Image (cartoon, rainbow, N blue to C red):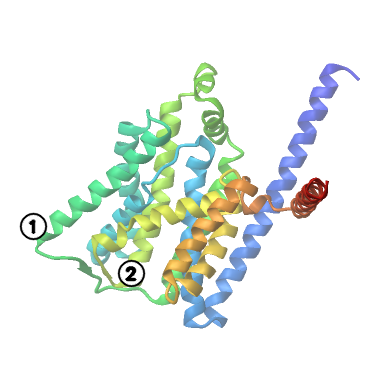
Amino acid sequence: MSTLDKTWNERLTGWLLDKTLLGRDVLVLFALAGWAMAVPHWGSEFAVSMALTCLMYVALATSWTLFCGTTRYLSLATAAFFGIGAYFSAIFIEDLGWAGVIAAGAGVAALVALVMGAAVLHLRGTYFAVLTFGMTELIRHAITYWEKQVTGTVGRVLTVVPERDTIYLTVLLLAVLAVATSIVIRRTRFGLALAGIGADEQRAQTLGVNTRLVKIGGFMLTAAFAGAVGAAMSVRWTYIDPSTVFNPFIGFQTVLIALIGGVATLWGPLIAAIVFSLLAETLRLQAPQLYLMTLGLLLILSVLYLPGGLASLRWATFRGWRDDTRAWWADLRRGKAARDKEALS
C-alpha cells in the first residue's frame, strides 16, 4: 500500500470515527434535553427547583470548560459575568422584555470579558486566577457603591417575573446551547487553536495562531453564557443584591464541578452538575458544613485517584482500584509477617 493510500485511509477512518462520535453526542444531548423538558410536567416544585439549579451549573460549567478546560487558564470571573447579567435583567426587563434581557445580558457580559481579557489574558497560572477573582470583587464593590451612593438602594426588586415554566425552559435552552456549542467548537479550527494554546502556547504562535484573539474570543464566549444564565436566574429570586448575584461561591462551585467532572471531557461537567445539585439540595440546608466538606473531599479524591474526572470512570478504573487495594493489603500483610518473624527471632 502506498503512502498516499495509507494517508487517505487514516483520514477516512478519522472522519468516520468523528462522525460516529458526533452522532452519539447529539443523540445523548437530545435524550437528556427531552428528559429535562418533562420535569415541569410530572415533577414537584422541589424537583423543578433542583433541576433548575442543575441546568444552571450545566451551562456555567460546560461553558467554563469550553475555554478554561482547553487553554488551561483558570478563570475565577464566572460570578462577575453571572452578576452582570442578573443586574442587567433586573434593571431592564420591563423595557426589553424576557428574550431581550437574556440576549443583552450575554452581550454586556461578553463586552466586560473583552475588556478584562485584553487586560489580563497575557498572564497565566496563579496570576491570571488571582486577577480575575480580584476583578470580580472590584465589580461587586463598584455596583454596591453605585447602589448605595447613586440610586440610594440596597438591592433590586423584580416586579416583572415570567412564569416558572418560561424560566425553566430558558435555562434548559441555555444549557443545551452550551453543550451543543462545545460539541461544535471541539471540531473546528477555533477549538483546535484553543487546544493548541493549552498544549503549548508558544508553539501555537509559531504555527500561525493569533493566540491573543483566540483567547479573548474564547473568554468572551464563556462570559456570554454566564451573563445569559445570570439574566435568566435573577428572576428566580425576585429580589437581588450584589452579595447574592456576585457571590464568589457561584464561581468556585462552577470550577469545582468542572474539575471533578473532567475539564477535558464533554459530558464530565454535566455529570458533576447533577451530582452536585443532588448533594446541594440534600445537605446544604440541613448540614451546610457537611456539604462543603463533601465538596473538598470529592475534589481531593478526584485529583489523587481520578485526574480525568467522573467522566473518565470505566469498569477498568474500578478493576484497577481493586487490584491496587489487594496489592496494598498484601504488602501490608507481608510487612506484618516480617516484623513478627523478627520479633520471634
Between 300 and 41, the one nearer to me in the picture: 300
Q: Where's the N terminus, which quadrant?
A: top right
Could you tell me residue 43's position as x and y percent?
Answer: 54, 81
- The secondary structure type at the circle numbered 2 is helix
Which residue is at the far right? 1
Q: Which residue is mark 1?
A: 149
Q: Residue at x 82, y 29 (%)?
A: 9
Residue type highlighted by circle 1: Gln
Q: How far apart are the two marked residues, 1 and 2, measured between alpha carbons?
A: 24 Å
Disc 1 element: helix
Q: Is residue 136 above or below residue 292?
A: above
Residue 306 visible within the image: no
Q: Is residue 70 left or right of residue 89?
A: right
Give how far across and how far down residue 280 sits, in percent.
48, 68
Q: Pointer 2: residues within 10 angstroms few (<14), some, or many (20+)?
A: many
Please give the name of the residue rendered at 29% of the width and 63% of the height, measured from the top-left corner: 244
Q: Earlier in the sequence, mark 1 or mark 2?
A: 1
Relative to residue 306, is residue 220 drawn left or right?
A: left
Q: Residue at x 53, y 32 (%)?
A: 198
Residue at the disc numbered 2 = 235
Q: Position of residue 55 (x, y in %)?
A: 50, 63
Q: Nearer the viewer, mark 1 or mark 2?
A: 1
In which quadrant of the rendered view does residue 87 lie? bottom left
Asked whether the viewer can see residue 24, the reply is yes
- The disc label shown at residue 158, or none: none
Amino acid type shown at disc 2: Val
Task: From this view, report whether residue 305 is shown above or below residue 12.
Answer: below
> Which residue is at the front of the view, 81 or 79?
79
C-beta proximity under 8 Å, tags 1 and 2: no
**Picture quadrant where residue 29 is located:** bottom right
In the rendered image, residue 107, in percent from the top left (x then y), is placed at 34, 48
